[in-house]
Amino acid sequence: MSEPRPAKATGFTATLRRLPSAQKSAQGAPAYSRFVNRRLGGYLAAAAYQAGLTPNQVTGVSAVFTFGGIATVALAEPAVWAGIAVALALVIGYALDSADGQLARLRGGGSVAGEWLDHVVDAVKVSSLHLAVLISGYRFFDLPRGFLLVPIAFQIVAVTLFFGMILNDQLRRSRGVPAGPAGAPSTLRSLLVVPTDYGLTCLVFLLFGFPEVFAVGYGLLFVANFAFLLAALPKWFRDMAALEGGGA
């Protein structure tokens, strides 16, 4: 399915004014994704709209930044410059990941192929980021070998969370159920779940030049994500059972 053609061109400022109508619900979104990444993505979406780019092209640029950052984690010896470069690449890649969806809505709607591409790139990202930390830890970190279990476990948690959230959304959508609760998004909830925010994972790489400090920050993020997963899985199961009015 081809992507919709953009509506009549407007100026950058006028495009920015249209962005609120091109936003997905912020219900359940962690604080960084909701208050920082979505805004950055909006500016990039408006710029891409003016440049005549398609959402799939923006997804491609996002992948270049994201996987460039991930490759740097795996290949470069930890250093201050490497941490800044990785964090910047991942942050830009994440903002562009938000921009492609906003651009699609600015152009009148996305495509099935575009949604597929976006999810596949996200899946590869989630599957490879913690493997890169594992490789870096094995090659460069002067830490107890037990640390290598952390990125292995973190990858299991991250992939399970990603798949669970995608599956929840698809099962709800297939039954005509809204993806999230009605009402205004909760700022308190956004702040409480910020440790699970991918944006915070991007920023922790600013510590990459200091392996011991990075290991602590990265480890704390793993613990927070693991705790969230343990709490989320029973709730998600009950939510899915409720879609059919009962449990298994």
Image (cartoon, rainbow, N blue to C red):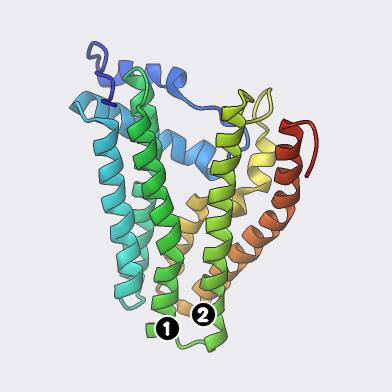
Percent x, y for residue 116?
38, 39
Q: Which part of the image, by quadrant, shows the N terminus?
A: top left
Percent x, y for residue 101?
39, 31
Q: Is residue 127 above or below residue 232?
A: below
Apparent side of residue 78 relative to residue 36 in the rendered image (left or right): left
Apparent side of residue 194 relative to residue 126 in the rendered image (left or right): right
Label 1, residues with CA under 10 Å away: few <14, some 14-19, many ≥20: some
* Residue 31 visible in the shown view: no
| Disc number placed over residue 96 in the picture, else none | none
> What's the amino acid at mark 2?
Leu
Give the residue drawn at x 31%, y 20%: 107
Apparent side of residue 121 relative to residue 56 in the rendered image (left or right): right
**Residue on which disc 1 sits:** 138
Mark closer to the chain start, 1 or 2: 1
Q: Is residue 222 above or below residue 16?
A: below
**Residue on which disc 2 sits:** 148
